[in-house]
Amino acid sequence: MGRTRGSATPTGRLTHTGGNAAACSALAHPVWVAAMISAALLFGGCSSTPKEDTDSTAAVERLYADAKDDMANGGWERAIKTLERVEGRAAGTLLAQQATLDLAYAQYRTGERAAALSTLDRFIKLHPSSPALDYALYLRGIVNFNDNLGILGSLAQQNLSERDQQASRDAYQAFRQLVTQFPQSRYANDGRARMDYIVNALADYELHVARYYVRRGAFLAAANRAQQVIQEYPQTPANEEALYIMQLCYGRLGLEQLRADTERVLKQNFPNSSVSADGIRQGKRAWWQLW
């Protein structure tokens, strides 16, 4: 995971002085014993070790090191609390920027997607010229690019293309900004690969909706949805079935010229089309589906 390196700007240490010279003198007379003890308690004593400033560079860096240890050991919740403290104490430094990015990642790992995105949006807004901006954009894409359906999705036998695709669109935008602004970034190649995956998933989602309309007999809606695949996601594997659905629906609607034109395009681009032979792909129905 990419990180911005740097240390916080030194803030100095607070010094602690203990009372006046009289209170610090070694008085031997018993009469002064009580007074000496009171003075020592009141002024801190002349021999006490100065307390370290909790906002000093060394203290904040140790705090950050503790957070990194927690992250390495899977202690994400504890790391989040510590990183929030580092952010505040090292404000205005590169260390604070690094803590913000680590905070977003820790929030992502604990399933706090909204919090992670909020943290990243704040970073991008406040640090548009940060050397870690490419990583921030990449991480924002990763947070949205989540193909883990979880237990409910598994029980429902749900495919990624069957879910609402807003998060996928947001991920695509983040990756596109990354590869556009930072084409040579170490994260750019992975971002491009994920963009290709997202485009295919979005096209498959439109096909999923088109198939549903076909099953319901809503042929005009199905044709329009399939046409949307052709227009918005050209050169994706979904184009083959989209053309077939359009051809089928135009035939059912009695639009013979459109049906013939679509059939010609289908044969020209997919001369060995398996969809033409097998028909619309039928996904395996989940146990809860009654239609």
Image (cartoon, rainbow, N blue to C red):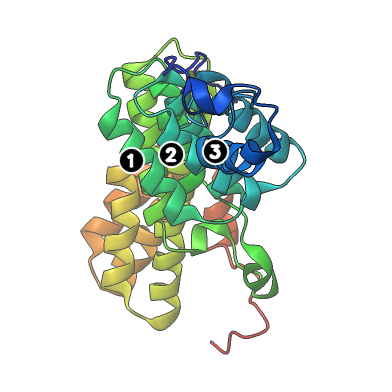
Q: Which residue is mark 2?
A: 140
Q: In the orientation shown, which residue stands out farthest toward the top? A: 184
Q: CA distance from mark 1 to mark 3?
A: 53 Å
Q: Which mark is residue 20?
A: none
Q: Which residue is mark 3?
A: 39
Front label number (1 vs 3): 3
In the image, residue 46 lies at what x, y percent?
Answer: 59, 24
Front label number (2 vs 1): 1
Compared to residue 262, the image places residue 129 above or below, namely above
Compared to residue 204, the image places residue 58 above or below, namely above
| Sequence-earlier tag: 2 or 3 | 3
Q: Nearer the viewer, residue 209 or 195?
A: 195
Front label number (2 vs 3): 3
Q: Residue at x 44, y 9 (%)?
A: 184
Q: Which residue is mark 1?
A: 121
Secondary structure category for the residue under label 1: helix
| Sequence-earlier tag: 2 or 1 | 1
Q: Residue at x 77, y 40 (%)?
A: 73
Q: Residue at x 41, y 52 (%)?
A: 167
Q: Amino acid at mark 2?
A: Arg
Q: Nearer the viewer, residue 212 or 197?
A: 197
Q: Nearer the viewer, residue 88 or 235?
A: 88
In the image, residue 277 lies at what x, y percent?
Answer: 58, 56
Q: CA distance from mark 2 to mark 1?
A: 8 Å
Q: Is residue 5 visible?
A: yes
Compared to residue 38, the image places residue 77 above or below, namely below
Compared to residue 101, the image places residue 272 above or below, namely below
Q: Quadrant of residue 38?
A: top right
Q: Amino acid at mark 1?
A: Asp
